[in-house]
Amino acid sequence: MSLKIGVPSKGRLMEKTFDWFGARGVVMARSGSDREYAGAVEGIAGVELVLLSAGEIPRELAAGRIHLGVTGSDLVRDKLADWEAQVVELAGLGFGHADLIIAVPVAWIDVDTVDDLDAAAAAFRRAHGFRLRIATKYHRLVREFLTEQGVADYQLVDSQGATEGTVKNLTAEAIADITSSGETLRANHLKILSDGLVHASQATLFAARGAEWDADTRTTLAVLAAQLGVVAEV
Protein backbone atom coordinates (compact mmCIF):
# COMPACT_ATOMS: atom_id res chain seq x y z
CA MET A 1 0.00 0.00 0.00
CA SER A 2 1.24 3.49 -0.89
CA LEU A 3 1.64 6.23 1.67
CA LYS A 4 -0.77 8.98 0.61
CA ILE A 5 0.18 12.60 1.21
CA GLY A 6 -2.34 15.39 0.70
CA VAL A 7 -1.02 18.72 -0.59
CA PRO A 8 -2.86 21.97 -1.46
CA SER A 9 -3.97 21.75 -5.06
CA LYS A 10 -3.20 25.28 -6.29
CA GLY A 11 -1.67 28.66 -5.65
CA ARG A 12 1.28 29.71 -3.51
CA LEU A 13 0.63 27.04 -0.88
CA MET A 14 1.05 24.30 -3.49
CA GLU A 15 4.13 25.94 -5.00
CA LYS A 16 5.77 26.53 -1.61
CA THR A 17 4.98 22.96 -0.51
CA PHE A 18 6.53 21.57 -3.68
CA ASP A 19 9.59 23.80 -3.07
CA TRP A 20 9.91 22.65 0.57
CA PHE A 21 9.83 18.95 -0.34
CA GLY A 22 11.98 19.50 -3.45
CA ALA A 23 14.71 21.14 -1.38
CA ARG A 24 14.85 17.89 0.60
CA GLY A 25 15.06 15.61 -2.42
CA VAL A 26 11.37 14.74 -2.74
CA VAL A 27 10.16 16.11 -6.08
CA MET A 28 6.43 16.72 -6.40
CA ALA A 29 4.60 17.82 -9.54
CA ARG A 30 1.13 18.02 -10.98
CA SER A 31 0.45 15.42 -13.65
CA GLY A 32 -1.70 16.43 -16.59
CA SER A 33 -3.48 19.78 -16.87
CA ASP A 34 -4.18 22.33 -14.14
CA ARG A 35 -7.75 21.02 -14.06
CA GLU A 36 -6.61 17.55 -13.03
CA TYR A 37 -6.12 16.91 -9.32
CA ALA A 38 -3.42 14.30 -9.76
CA GLY A 39 0.28 14.42 -9.04
CA ALA A 40 3.50 12.48 -9.00
CA VAL A 41 6.34 12.06 -6.50
CA GLU A 42 9.96 11.31 -7.38
CA GLY A 43 12.91 10.73 -5.10
CA ILE A 44 11.24 8.25 -2.79
CA ALA A 45 9.34 5.03 -3.49
CA GLY A 46 5.88 4.19 -2.20
CA VAL A 47 4.50 7.74 -1.87
CA GLU A 48 1.32 8.83 -3.64
CA LEU A 49 0.49 12.53 -4.06
CA VAL A 50 -3.14 13.59 -3.52
CA LEU A 51 -4.02 17.17 -4.48
CA LEU A 52 -6.81 18.68 -2.36
CA SER A 53 -7.97 22.10 -1.24
CA ALA A 54 -6.28 23.23 1.98
CA GLY A 55 -9.69 23.18 3.68
CA GLU A 56 -10.32 19.54 2.72
CA ILE A 57 -7.04 18.20 4.09
CA PRO A 58 -8.00 18.27 7.82
CA ARG A 59 -11.15 16.25 7.03
CA GLU A 60 -9.24 13.71 4.94
CA LEU A 61 -6.62 13.34 7.69
CA ALA A 62 -9.31 12.82 10.34
CA ALA A 63 -11.04 10.21 8.15
CA GLY A 64 -7.74 8.38 7.62
CA ARG A 65 -8.04 8.58 3.84
CA ILE A 66 -4.58 10.16 3.62
CA HIS A 67 -1.57 9.35 5.80
CA LEU A 68 0.09 12.77 5.70
CA GLY A 69 -1.17 16.22 4.81
CA VAL A 70 0.08 19.79 4.46
CA THR A 71 -2.33 22.52 5.48
CA GLY A 72 -2.61 25.54 7.75
CA SER A 73 -2.29 24.82 11.46
CA ASP A 74 -5.33 27.07 11.99
CA LEU A 75 -7.52 24.88 9.77
CA VAL A 76 -6.66 21.67 11.63
CA ARG A 77 -7.30 23.27 15.01
CA ASP A 78 -10.58 24.83 13.93
CA LYS A 79 -12.06 21.98 11.89
CA LEU A 80 -11.08 19.04 14.12
CA ALA A 81 -12.44 18.75 17.64
CA ASP A 82 -9.75 17.37 19.95
CA TRP A 83 -7.34 17.61 17.01
CA GLU A 84 -4.34 16.15 18.84
CA ALA A 85 -6.20 12.84 19.22
CA GLN A 86 -6.69 12.69 15.45
CA VAL A 87 -3.44 14.01 13.96
CA VAL A 88 0.22 14.43 14.86
CA GLU A 89 1.99 17.68 14.04
CA LEU A 90 5.26 16.64 12.39
CA ALA A 91 6.79 19.96 11.26
CA GLY A 92 6.06 23.59 10.64
CA LEU A 93 7.15 24.35 7.09
CA GLY A 94 8.06 28.02 7.59
CA PHE A 95 5.65 29.59 5.10
CA GLY A 96 1.96 30.43 4.86
CA HIS A 97 2.25 32.57 7.98
CA ALA A 98 -0.93 34.31 9.11
CA ASP A 99 -2.32 35.33 12.49
CA LEU A 100 -5.86 34.66 13.65
CA ILE A 101 -6.68 37.80 15.62
CA ILE A 102 -9.55 39.67 17.23
CA ALA A 103 -10.12 43.21 15.97
CA VAL A 104 -12.52 45.98 16.97
CA PRO A 105 -13.36 49.41 15.51
CA VAL A 106 -10.60 52.02 15.83
CA ALA A 107 -13.28 54.32 17.26
CA TRP A 108 -13.44 52.14 20.38
CA ILE A 109 -10.67 54.11 22.05
CA ASP A 110 -11.23 52.46 25.45
CA VAL A 111 -10.99 48.92 24.08
CA ASP A 112 -7.40 47.73 23.69
CA THR A 113 -7.32 44.32 25.41
CA VAL A 114 -9.51 41.23 25.70
CA ASP A 115 -10.50 42.36 29.20
CA ASP A 116 -11.63 45.66 27.72
CA LEU A 117 -13.65 43.73 25.13
CA ASP A 118 -15.28 41.73 27.95
CA ALA A 119 -16.35 44.95 29.67
CA ALA A 120 -17.55 46.48 26.40
CA ALA A 121 -19.54 43.34 25.60
CA ALA A 122 -21.32 43.45 28.95
CA ALA A 123 -22.12 47.14 28.45
CA PHE A 124 -23.30 46.45 24.90
CA ARG A 125 -25.73 43.80 26.09
CA ARG A 126 -27.15 46.10 28.78
CA ALA A 127 -27.60 48.90 26.24
CA HIS A 128 -28.97 46.89 23.30
CA GLY A 129 -30.57 43.81 24.81
CA PHE A 130 -28.55 41.34 22.72
CA ARG A 131 -24.99 40.06 22.76
CA LEU A 132 -22.13 41.76 20.94
CA ARG A 133 -21.56 40.03 17.60
CA ILE A 134 -18.13 38.81 16.49
CA ALA A 135 -17.94 37.78 12.83
CA THR A 136 -15.61 34.88 12.01
CA LYS A 137 -15.05 31.74 9.97
CA TYR A 138 -13.09 30.15 12.86
CA HIS A 139 -15.77 29.32 15.40
CA ARG A 140 -14.04 26.61 17.43
CA LEU A 141 -10.71 28.42 17.83
CA VAL A 142 -12.29 31.75 18.70
CA ARG A 143 -14.80 30.26 21.14
CA GLU A 144 -12.06 28.31 22.94
CA PHE A 145 -9.85 31.41 23.14
CA LEU A 146 -12.60 33.67 24.51
CA THR A 147 -13.70 31.01 27.00
CA GLU A 148 -10.13 30.75 28.31
CA GLN A 149 -10.07 34.54 28.64
CA GLY A 150 -13.38 34.59 30.54
CA VAL A 151 -15.35 36.51 27.92
CA ALA A 152 -19.04 35.50 27.93
CA ASP A 153 -21.32 38.28 26.64
CA TYR A 154 -20.84 37.74 22.91
CA GLN A 155 -22.19 35.71 20.01
CA LEU A 156 -20.25 34.40 17.03
CA VAL A 157 -21.82 35.10 13.65
CA ASP A 158 -20.69 33.21 10.60
CA SER A 159 -18.81 35.14 7.95
CA GLN A 160 -18.70 33.57 4.51
CA GLY A 161 -17.49 36.65 2.65
CA ALA A 162 -15.09 39.45 3.54
CA THR A 163 -15.06 39.33 7.33
CA GLU A 164 -13.40 42.75 7.61
CA GLY A 165 -16.44 44.39 6.00
CA THR A 166 -19.01 43.06 8.47
CA VAL A 167 -18.52 45.89 10.98
CA LYS A 168 -18.94 48.57 8.32
CA ASN A 169 -22.02 46.69 7.04
CA LEU A 170 -23.46 46.62 10.59
CA THR A 171 -23.74 42.83 10.70
CA ALA A 172 -21.16 42.56 13.53
CA GLU A 173 -19.48 44.76 16.12
CA ALA A 174 -16.07 43.03 16.06
CA ILE A 175 -14.27 40.37 14.02
CA ALA A 176 -11.91 37.42 14.41
CA ASP A 177 -10.03 36.73 11.21
CA ILE A 178 -6.75 35.73 9.61
CA THR A 179 -4.38 38.57 8.75
CA SER A 180 -0.81 38.73 7.49
CA SER A 181 -0.12 42.44 7.04
CA GLY A 182 -3.08 44.16 8.72
CA GLU A 183 -3.62 46.44 5.72
CA THR A 184 -7.20 45.30 5.08
CA LEU A 185 -8.03 45.82 8.75
CA ARG A 186 -6.71 49.37 8.67
CA ALA A 187 -8.60 50.07 5.45
CA ASN A 188 -11.79 49.05 7.27
CA HIS A 189 -10.96 51.17 10.36
CA LEU A 190 -10.30 48.17 12.59
CA LYS A 191 -7.53 47.60 15.15
CA ILE A 192 -6.14 44.38 16.59
CA LEU A 193 -6.48 43.95 20.35
CA SER A 194 -3.05 44.12 21.97
CA ASP A 195 -3.49 40.59 23.41
CA GLY A 196 -5.93 39.42 20.75
CA LEU A 197 -3.74 36.84 19.00
CA VAL A 198 -5.82 33.65 18.91
CA HIS A 199 -3.39 31.51 16.89
CA ALA A 200 -0.21 32.11 14.85
CA SER A 201 -0.76 29.87 11.84
CA GLN A 202 1.66 28.43 9.30
CA ALA A 203 1.69 25.62 6.74
CA THR A 204 2.32 22.41 8.69
CA LEU A 205 2.94 18.76 7.91
CA PHE A 206 0.53 16.50 9.80
CA ALA A 207 0.18 12.71 10.10
CA ALA A 208 -3.17 10.96 10.53
CA ARG A 209 -3.41 8.73 13.59
CA GLY A 210 -6.41 6.89 12.11
CA ALA A 211 -4.94 6.07 8.70
CA GLU A 212 -4.10 2.46 7.85
CA TRP A 213 -0.48 2.19 8.95
CA ASP A 214 0.70 -1.21 7.77
CA ALA A 215 4.31 -2.42 7.61
CA ASP A 216 4.86 -0.89 4.16
CA THR A 217 3.53 2.57 4.98
CA ARG A 218 5.41 2.67 8.28
CA THR A 219 8.64 1.79 6.48
CA THR A 220 7.97 4.44 3.83
CA LEU A 221 7.20 6.99 6.57
CA ALA A 222 10.49 6.24 8.31
CA VAL A 223 12.46 6.70 5.05
CA LEU A 224 10.54 9.86 4.15
CA ALA A 225 10.92 11.36 7.63
CA ALA A 226 14.67 10.75 7.58
CA GLN A 227 14.95 12.42 4.18
CA LEU A 228 12.85 15.40 5.31
CA GLY A 229 14.69 15.71 8.62
CA VAL A 230 11.59 15.32 10.80
CA VAL A 231 10.66 12.96 13.62
CA ALA A 232 7.62 10.89 12.69
CA GLU A 233 5.82 8.92 15.39
CA VAL A 234 2.19 8.05 14.74
Image (cartoon, helix red, strand yellow):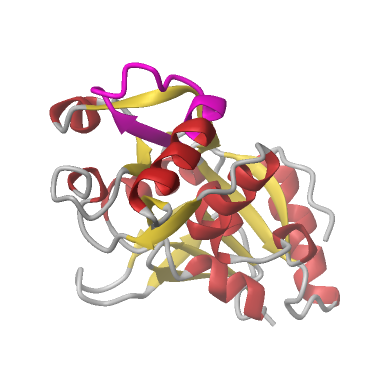
On screen, residue 129 above or below 208: above
Quadrant where the C terminus sits is bottom right
x 51%, y 32%: residue: 119
Q: Report the front residue among 127 and 233.
A: 127
Q: Does the magenta segment cover residue 112?
A: yes
On screen, residue 9 above or below 162: below
Q: Is residue 170 left or right of residue 41?
A: left
Q: Report the front residue among 53 and 99.
A: 99
Residue 141, horizontal then vertical, whole percent: 56, 51
Tell me, yes or no, if residue 107 can be seen here: yes
x 20%, y 52%: residue: 162
Tally the numbered discs. 0
Q: Which of the 4 quarters of the picture holds residue 130? A: bottom left
What's drawn in magenta, residue-wise? 99-117
Q: Report the front residue among 43 and 18.
A: 18
x 19%, y 33%: residue: 184
Q: Report the front residue among 33 and 121.
A: 121
Quadrant where the N terminus sits is bottom right
Tell me, yes or no, if residue 2 can be seen here: no
Q: Which of the 4 quarters of the picture holds residue 230? A: top right
Q: Which of the 4 quarters of the picture holds residue 85? A: bottom right
Residue 202, horizontal then vertical, whole percent: 50, 39
Q: Does the magenta segment cover residue 8?
A: no
Residue 25, horizontal then vertical, whole percent: 55, 43
Residue 145, horizontal then vertical, whole percent: 61, 43
x 70%, y 49%: residue: 89
